[in-house]
């Protein structure tokens, strides 16, 4: 703290003097303590506990060599979960102050719990997070309570108040519910092992058929975190997690939560609340029974009235049996006529279907099919013959035409017109006079006969010959 901001500096600035009254000194000391000290947590032995009618608690916290007065005011001690006793090791949290009236240095307490509760709380949170991550608290594995609960296995202390609360609630709400107590310690070092073993024993009894438990209830009354610690042990949580029986946890008061509460299928805030959850309300069921009984009586009256009306109608119809017989006879005649009409109509329809089937059968008979195929074949033969004759005639005419053209273009036809074909000694056709030489022997072919020739002179187209020479 800055010296310029201390209560003493402020006092000097205000009064200009260094003399203080006792009240001023105590007030300044109180202010100094409260301003300079943060909230503290102190562990020690509780002694000289005083609880006046004002509701405040006053006690001394000490160790082997020192002590400090403590004030635990009513607004805060109402939240305390334990009933402290002198000689008990406790852990208190609060702020340092000073009681001005006596000048006593003291601790204003905000919370009080057994010594070591902080470590227990840390262990509680660590195990809770571990089991939550493993899925032991998942809602999808929580099982609903049976519709009817006849037999409850209760794991608790046989002498505790929790069992008395459960029994009284069940006796009041539904006396027919059976209770089997599996006695265990609910506090101390051996409690967790006994509780876990009792859970396994209840499951084994059901599995072997020795018992018919519907639900397993774990319960104890309120207490400090240390008192409730057996229900926070891993072995108890594991036994509950593996239980085939539906489990209900009712440990402590409504503000208390245990690991067993999170693992169990259902958590009840108190043992009494658990008993109410596991039993129907007898008075409500009786009221509902009376209501249903009234509804049943009303339904019976309505049904009887309907039967009376029906009986009266039947009696009215039976007053003249002959009229009833006449109506039935008329009905019989009508049905007979309808049957005859249907029979005749059916006969006509069947006859028409038979004729149609006969015609279709004739059309599909092998003889009819063969005749139709013969007719089709004869028609095809005629068409083939006509087509062949037409094609042959056309080809003959084309052959005559081509023969005539061939003859008109052939060398014989050219010779007939007075021309001749001149060939050389090798039979080559002479087409150009320029290729001849004087005295060369030639052969000339005429339309009729041939003659040997000898070139006496050569006369040709000079221009053409010149073009040929080039």
Image: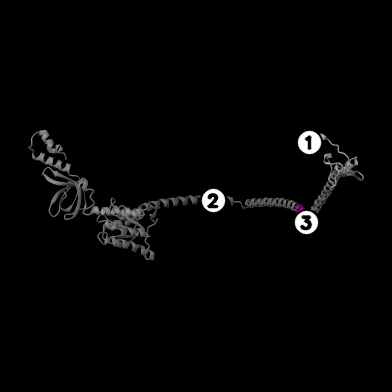
- The N terminus - image quarter: top left
Q: Is residue 420 above or below residue 144?
A: above
Q: CA distance from mark 2 to mark 3?
A: 71 Å
Q: Which residue is mark 2?
A: 310
Q: Quadrant of residue 441?
A: top right
Q: Is residue 470 above or below residue 133?
A: above
Q: Which residue is mark 1?
A: 467
Residue 416 visible: yes
Q: Magenta: predominant secondary structure element? A: helix
Residue 180 visible: no
Q: Residue at x 45, y 50 (%)?
A: 298
Q: CA distance from mark 1 to mark 2?
A: 140 Å
The crowding category of the residue bearing disc 1, from other C-alpha atoms within 10 Å (few below 14, some 14 to 19, many at least 20), is few
Q: Nearer the viewer, mark 1 or mark 2?
A: 1
> Which element carries disc 2, helix, strand or loop?
helix
Q: Residue at x 31, y 61 (%)?
A: 196
Say which of 152 and 369 sits in front: 369
Q: Quadrant of residue 9?
A: top left
Q: Is residue 149 left or right of residue 88?
A: right
Q: Is residue 333 left or right of residue 382?
A: left
> Which element carries disc 3, helix, strand or loop?
helix
Give the farthest residue toward the front. Answer: 439
Say which of 36 and 466 sits in front: 466
Q: Residue at x 12, y 53 (%)?
A: 65
Q: Could you say where residue 287 lies in the image, as x and y percent from the top left?
A: 38, 51
> Which element carries disc 1, helix, strand or loop?
helix
| Residues in magenta, as a range | 359-370
Q: Is residue 363 magenta?
A: yes
Q: Which residue is mark 3?
A: 366
Question: Counting residues from the N terminus, which is met first, the one under dot 2 or under dot 3?
Answer: 2
């Amino acid at each position: 703290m800055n010296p310029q901001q201390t209560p003493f500096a402020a006092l000097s600035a205000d009064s200009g003097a260094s003399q203080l009254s006792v009240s001023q000194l105590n007030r300044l000391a109180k202010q100094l303590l409260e301003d300079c000290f943060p909230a503290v947590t102190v562990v020690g032995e509780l002694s000289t506990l005083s609880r006046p009618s004002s509701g405040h608690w006053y006690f001394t916290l000490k160790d082997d060599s020192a002590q400090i007065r403590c004030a635990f005011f009513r607004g805060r001690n109402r939240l305390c979960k334990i009933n402290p006793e002198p000689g008990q090791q406790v852990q208190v949290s609060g702020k340092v102050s000073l009681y001005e009236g006596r000048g006593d240095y003291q601790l204003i307490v905000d919370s009080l719990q057994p010594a070591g509760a902080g470590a227990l709380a840390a262990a509680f949170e660590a195990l809770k997070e571990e089991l939550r991550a493993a899925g032991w608290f998942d809602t999808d594995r929580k099982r609903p309570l049976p519709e009817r609960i006849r037999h409850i296995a209760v794991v608790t202390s046989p002498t505790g108040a929790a069992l008395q609360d459960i029994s009284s609630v069940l006796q009041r709400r539904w006396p027919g519910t059976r209770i089997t107590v599996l006695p265990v310690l609910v506090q101390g070092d051996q409690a967790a092992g006994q509780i876990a073993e009792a859970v396994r024993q209840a499951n084994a009894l059901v599995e072997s058929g020795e018992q018919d438990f519907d639900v397993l209830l774990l319960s104890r009354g309120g207490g400090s975190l240390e008192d409730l610690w057996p229900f926070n042990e891993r072995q108890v949580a594991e036994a509950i997690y593996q239980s085939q029986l539906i489990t209900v946890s009712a440990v402590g008061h409504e503000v208390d939560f245990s690991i067993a509460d999170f693992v169990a299928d259902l958590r009840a805030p108190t043992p009494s609340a658990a008993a109410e959850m596991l039993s129907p309300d007898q008075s409500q069921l009786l009221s509902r029974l009376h209501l249903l009984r009234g509804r049943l009586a009303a339904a019976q009256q309505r049904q009887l009235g309907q039967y009376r009306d029906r009986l009266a109608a039947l009696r009215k119809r039976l007053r003249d049996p002959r009229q009833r017989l006449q109506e039935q006879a008329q009905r019989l005649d009508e049905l007979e006529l309808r049957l005859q009409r249907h029979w005749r109509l059916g006969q006509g329809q069947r006859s028409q279907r038979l004729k149609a089937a006969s015609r279709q059968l004739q059309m599909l008979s092998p003889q009819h099919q063969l005749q139709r195929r013969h007719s089709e074949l004869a028609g095809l033969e005629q068409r083939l013959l006509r087509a062949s004759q037409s094609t042959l005639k056309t080809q003959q005419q084309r052959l005559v035409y081509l023969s005539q053209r061939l003859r008109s273009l052939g060398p014989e036809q050219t010779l007939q017109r007075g021309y001749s074909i001149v060939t050389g000694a090798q039979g080559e056709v002479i087409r150009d006079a320029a290729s001849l030489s004087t005295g060369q022997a030639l052969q000339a072919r005429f339309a009729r006969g041939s003659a040997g020739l000898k070139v006496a002179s050569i006369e040709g187209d000079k221009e053409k010959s010149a073009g040929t020479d080039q």
